């Protein structure tokens, strides 16, 4: 596996690889890799001859009061994990190279960014779309894989690709969970043992919502209310949102259908966790 840190060298590699007729699949990450990321890499390998994993803790997607400084980092360990997955390139640029002095551009998707996580993390998705746009230009992938845990991010990136006529296929990968159901996330490493136990209320609440729908409930707001009550009853948690939305438009979903998604953002101690599930099927 090659480790490339310069954007120019990354583009040169991609030009050569495309000229040789190889398919490139990008897996964008912020590092501190877990089995969820490795599953994305395996999916990428099934679909493309050459897989590029980017590792960049993107300052532009963190708000001033967020956890950029304490975001977990483990470059050596990450490089070993990526190397063991048959990845062709680990692209790990510095913030100075990605955002040189004088950088002034933002790629903004409106509408889809003004709800759910966008409300409590203003500007976050502009940082995500800007860095993903840069990565797409530098890596020139035919395909890119994103996890469904960040379902709003996924919807926004799909929209950006459609709106900008970008020739990149976006592949959604199902959420990868710990044995007990907690969705894998680099931020799980912040949780103290008692918080880790409490964090299970997210998964359990999603199961409650699915059970209600399996039992015949069709009112999205009733599902939301019960799920919310359940999370509150777990005690010592701070709900950012509980929502039942259309998986693509993210619009509020009053009547449950096949595209209805139950989505949550909950703070356990100082750690904000998100999770989601389709309610039917
Ligand atoms: O999902 C993430 O880890 C990040 O938002 C991404 C897509 C790598 C952009 O920084």
Image (cartoon, grey):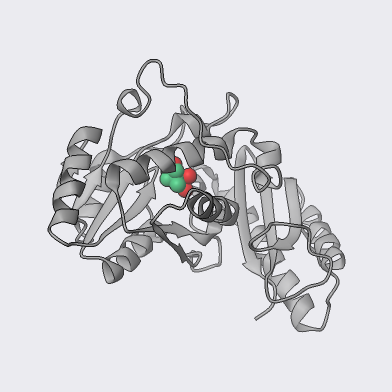
Q: Nearer the viewer, residue 73 or 88?
A: 88
- Determine the image quadrant of residue 92: top left
For the point 31% across and 45% down, which residue is it?
Answer: 54
Q: Name the residue at 71% across, 74% down.
A: 210
Is 171 above or below relative to 186? below
Q: Number of numbered discs present?
A: 0
**Depth check: 61 or 207 in front?**
61
Of residues 238 and 126, the one nearer the viewer is 126
Question: Image height check: is 255 above or below 183?
Answer: below
Q: Measured from the top left, where is residue 145 in percent x and y?
A: 40, 59
Residue 219: quadrant of the picture:
bottom right
Q: Position of residue 41 (x, y in %)?
A: 32, 61
Which quarter of the rendering shows the C terminus? bottom right
Q: Residue 200: in sight, yes or no?
A: no
Let me know if residue 269 appears in the view. yes
Q: Is residue 107 left or right of residue 257?
A: left
Q: Which residue: 61% across, 57% down?
A: 275
* Residue 23 position in % (x across, y down): 24, 62
On screen, residue 109 versus residue 201, left or right, reads left
The residue lying furthest to the top in this view is 101
As drawn, which residue projects farthest toward the bottom? 215
Q: In the depicted view, which residue is nearer to us: 221 or 9?
A: 9
Quadrant location, ligand no. 1? top left
Residue furthest to the front in view is: 165
Q: Position of residue 9 (x, y in %)?
A: 17, 37
Vertically, is 174 above or below 155? below
């Amino acid at each position: 596996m090659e480790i490339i840190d310069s954007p120019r060298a990354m583009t040169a590699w991609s030009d050569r690889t495309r000229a040789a007729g190889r398919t490139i699949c990008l897996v964008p990450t912020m590092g501190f890799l877990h089995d969820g990321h490795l599953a994305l890499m395996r999916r990428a390998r099934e679909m493309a001859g050459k897989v590029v994993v980017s590792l960049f803790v993107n300052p532009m997607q963190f708000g001033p009061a967020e956890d950029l400084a304490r975001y977990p980092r483990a470059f050596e360990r990450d490089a070993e994990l990526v190397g063991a997955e048959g990845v062709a390139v680990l692209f790990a640029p510095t913030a100075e190279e990605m955002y040189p002095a004088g950088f002034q551009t933002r790629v903004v998707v409106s509408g889809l960014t003004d709800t759910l996580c966008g409300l409590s993390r203003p500007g976050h998705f502009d940082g995500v779309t800007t860095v993903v746009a840069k990565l797409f230009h530098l890596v020139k992938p035919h395909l890119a894989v994103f996890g469904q845990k960040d379902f709003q991010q996924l919807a926004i990136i799909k929209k950006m690709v459609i709106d900008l006529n970008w020739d990149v296929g976006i592949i959604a990968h199902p959420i990868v969970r710990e044995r007990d159901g907690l969705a894998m996330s680099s931020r799980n490493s912040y949780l103290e043992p008692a918080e880790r136990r409490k964090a299970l209320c997210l998964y359990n609440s999603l199961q409650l919502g699915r059970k209600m729908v399996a039992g015949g409930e069709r009112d999205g707001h009733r599902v939301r209310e019960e799920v919310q009550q359940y999370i509150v009853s777990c005690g010592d948690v701070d709900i950012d949102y509980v929502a039942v939305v259309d998986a693509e438009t993210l619009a509020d979903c009053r009547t449950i259908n096949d595209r209805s998604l139950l989505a949550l953002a909950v703070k356990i101690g100082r750690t904000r966790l998100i999770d989601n599930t389709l309610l039917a099927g």
